[in-house]
Amino acid sequence: MKAELSPRRQAFLYGLLCVLLIPFVFPTWWMVTSSVKPISDIFAFPPQLMPESYDWTTYSKVFELQPFVRQYWNSAYIAALVTVGTMVVSSMAGYAFARIKFPFANAIFMVVLLGLLIPSEVTIVPLFQMFLKAGMVNTHWPLILVPIFGAPSVFATFVMRQFFIALPVELEEAARVDGLGRFKIFRKIALPLARPALASVAIFTFLHSWNLYLEPIVFLSSADKFTLPQALTQYTDAYGGPMWNIQLAAATLTALPVLIVFIIAQKQFVEGLAHTGLKG
Amino acid sequence: MAEVTLSNVRKSYGAVDIIHGIDLGISDGEFVVLVGPSGCGKSTLLRMVAGLETITGGEVRIGGRVVNDLDPKDRDIAMVFQNYALYPHMTVATNMGFSLEHRGGSKAEIVERVEWAADILGLTHLLDRYPRQLSGGQRQRVAMGRAIVRDPQVFLFDEPLSNLDAKLRVVMRGEIKSLHQRLKTTTVYVTHDQVEAMTMADKIVVLNGGRVEQIGAPLDLYDRPANQFVAGFIGSPSMNFLTGTITSEGFSAPGILLPLPEVAHGHKDRKAVYGIRPEHFVLDENGVPAEIILVEPMGSETQVTMKLGEMLATGVFRERVSLSPGATIRVRPELGNIHLFAADGGQRLN
Amino acid sequence: MAVVQQTARPEGRSSSSFWTIARRDSLAGFLFIAPQLIGITLFVLIPLCLVFWYSLHEWNVLANTFTYTGLANYQMLLEDTSLPSVLGATAIFSAGLVIFNLSLALLLAVLLNQKLAGITVFRTLFFSPVVVSLVAWTIVWGFLLQKNGGINGVLLVFGIEGPNWLREPVTAMISVIVVQVFKNVGLNMILFLAALQGVPNELYEAARIDGAPRFKQFRRITLPLISPTILLTSIITIVGSLQVFAQIAVLTQGGPGLTTTVLVYYLYQQAFQFHFFGYGSTLSIMLFVIVAVLTFAQWQMRKRIVFYES
């Protein structure tokens, strides 16, 4: 498969790849360019690949119509907390399931894995009722606690466990002989070596939290509590129709930072996910 | 430094017994090698001394103190692992100083100890490197350095040379031995390689199936193996065994009569196993006839596979045997180097 | 040094004989898993029991009544005239998504596995939608798929009059599938690419010496060797397809009619728009059973479709 290709084959492949690329890349381009088109040009025919005139007021409207800064902050801090929390919880649990002998370890692991089988949509009704009773509806607690401790973190635990299983036992034995207790072995040996796995857990978790949509619209009801995905859909006119250019401006503000981080660190993203993400 | 005593040490996983009650005394400063085929329990035994495996029964004492329930870190031992187990995310210096760091050594003290150990092992110029930047032999040295910085009561080695190539293994063997002569720390060393055991040990413990077959100095094991297992395990190429009967004329094996030493006559008419090392055959006009099957010249010596009566045996001769397969030579077993074992159980008879 | 320790505790066992190494390790193990275990109990196990309990009740939020009705909600499942189309939409959506997603992912992975300069740039670009905010991605596509939107604009340049994608039954379903596939196919693509790169090159060299043509190499060597990955990705993709909510909510709101109302969206409507929490819980149970059965079935199938397991 990896044989050298003839120039003609190469040209054909490049062409094919470029055509296939259109639906992956064009929407992002269209989002960014349309967000600065005046409303009259939004549906212009023929379509304007580059804006012919610019209307930057869409961006100021994003901030005028909704507490967008606040919503941005909500999404960011929730995703950050969830990411860090999940890394802690899942690396500890994953380590224990991979490395520590304790009674019922396998049975407990099976129960935990049940979380993989249960889409969070299944439990959304009782979770809503539980948080309602706890007075936490229209707060960010459900969006923080459930992902860190509940079903979404099970996948992370699984990834971490797979990683720790593959880590040579002798390293930990050497550390025991060197005078380290369980927790220190975890902190000083296992965790530093688990960086690639932790990175992919962090990426997955961040994206998951950042994209959460059902949970916010179930749990949150006031605009200053909203997260970005929810806020994006709120830019509507008096008739409930979307204000396209403003929605697209807000969408651009939401999507671009993550996209830029991704392009800078794409190697870590892609290889992290490929090598530690889902093997086994 | 300390002595290590094992009394009736046992290990079982559920109903399966791995170690069947082992007694062993290791005196202060001694270099003891545990040797045996794979699965004999030698590594398990070492790991029980280290505290990496729990002890099912019996007692392990280090320096007079029962350590059964102590963590490895409280046993004051250092261990060199088969795969070195160097921390990949730390430099050589940090690797070596890591244990001191966790035992509350001061910075200056750690630096001093690490430099001392690096100097002994010739690692000084590598202190800032990471394990992945080192060759196999260098990693091996770092693993040893990590063990010696702490000046522990006991060194434990778990097949430390098995990942090195043949040439480097010989070099490191010498280094470990001279290190021991310099530091005089009690050492327990596990290997499956009987050459390593012979060359390094003050005392060899031969293990088989979770039991001790024999304990003794290398040459004692070579000269007077207590049973057929040890006889076959120690020495390379390994001892020839011929089954037959002890008679007044000699040892009668199928198709051949072999000479016997005087002492053997006490066991007349007994079924036995006749053991003779390849290097204890002598070319002699008056010897027994042997048909040559295969000749393997090694330069310094020649290894010959030959047919003694109906059985194959190996002989090693310092002389150059320039005969080809099919020819017949005459060989004589050295009377003083004949080993007789009971046909049932394999215990030594003479 | 040795002497000091020897006299300090000549016969002493460890400081406490109860806390043996094994016991201390067990304690450590439980402490390490405690957060996850408590979390699972609180946010998965208890809700799972509750959702079953709710499904046996008639729950009127406005009147604040909660009455036991036995299997009445399950009876309602059978009588619900919307449910057949909901399940149909779910099945079409999931099947279409899985087939389109896996074949596109495999195609892209094979193309990206070629020796070509700048191939990582393509890899990055194909993967990029994965990191674009889901709702942002959906909004752009919604914008593109409008009657007078970008896609129809381009079609019109070529003289084709495009449909109102999101307002006609067949095209609406195709649209939500396609939008979802382009968003996430990069993940499966990367997994397939890693699997392809794990196939030893010698096997292809041996096959070439044996004279096997390329497509045969693919069918007889590549596919069997990456079959564990195919199984894994298909499980993940199917389970994922049953959870798709945001795209439907933003693009079609389940319409036109019920044509794109998948189970999760229907569940959301029943529970949180119409406040039928009892019936919503029954639908949750149904979703749970479907996911469990599908996962189990695929797992069982692994013997048949996975030719090779490392």
Image (cartoon, helix red, strand yellow):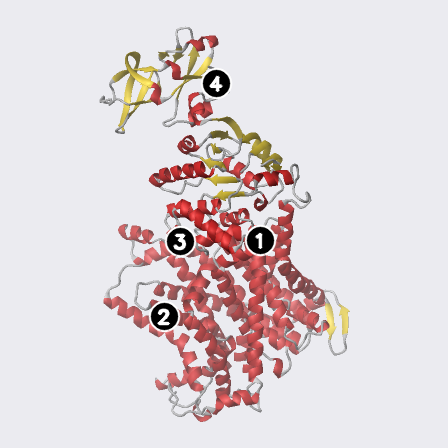
Query: In this image, B34 relative to B311: left or right?
Result: right
- What residue is drawn where x is 54% and y is 82%? A232
Chain of the residue where label 3 is placed in the rendered structure: B
Amino acid beneath label 4? Arg
What element does badge 4 sit on? Answer: loop
The residue mark sitting in front, 1 or 3, is 3
Amino acid beneath label 3? Arg
What element does badge 1 sit on? Answer: helix
The answer to whether residue C260 is visible is: no
> Label 3, label 4: how many angstroms apart (C-alpha)?
50 Å
The residue mark sitting in front, 3 or 4, is 3
User: Do the dots labelled 1 and 2 sit on one chain?
Assistant: no
- What residue is drawn where x is 58% and y is 78%? A74
Which quarter of the figure has residue C159?
Answer: bottom left
The percent position of residue B299, horizontal first and vertical second, equals: 25, 29
> Label 1, label 3: how many angstroms apart (C-alpha)?
28 Å
- Judging by the rendered image, the residue that carries numbered circle 2 is C122
- Judging by the rendered image, the residue that carries numbered circle 4 is B348
Which quarter of the figure has residue A145?
Answer: bottom right
User: Do the dots labelled 1 and 3 sit on one chain?
Assistant: no
Q: Nearer the viewer, residue B73 or B348?
A: B73
- Categorize mark 1 by other alpha carbons within 10 Å: few (<14), some (14-19), many (20+): many
- Judging by the rendered image, the residue that carries numbered circle 1 is A97
Chain of the residue where label 1 is placed in the rendered structure: A
- Judging by the rendered image, the residue that carries numbered circle 3 is B132
What element does badge 3 sit on? Answer: helix
Q: Are marks 3 and 4 in contact (CB under 8 Å)?
A: no
The residue mark sitting in front, 2 or 3, is 3
Amino acid beneath label 2? Phe
Query: In this image, B292 relative to B135: left or right?
Result: left
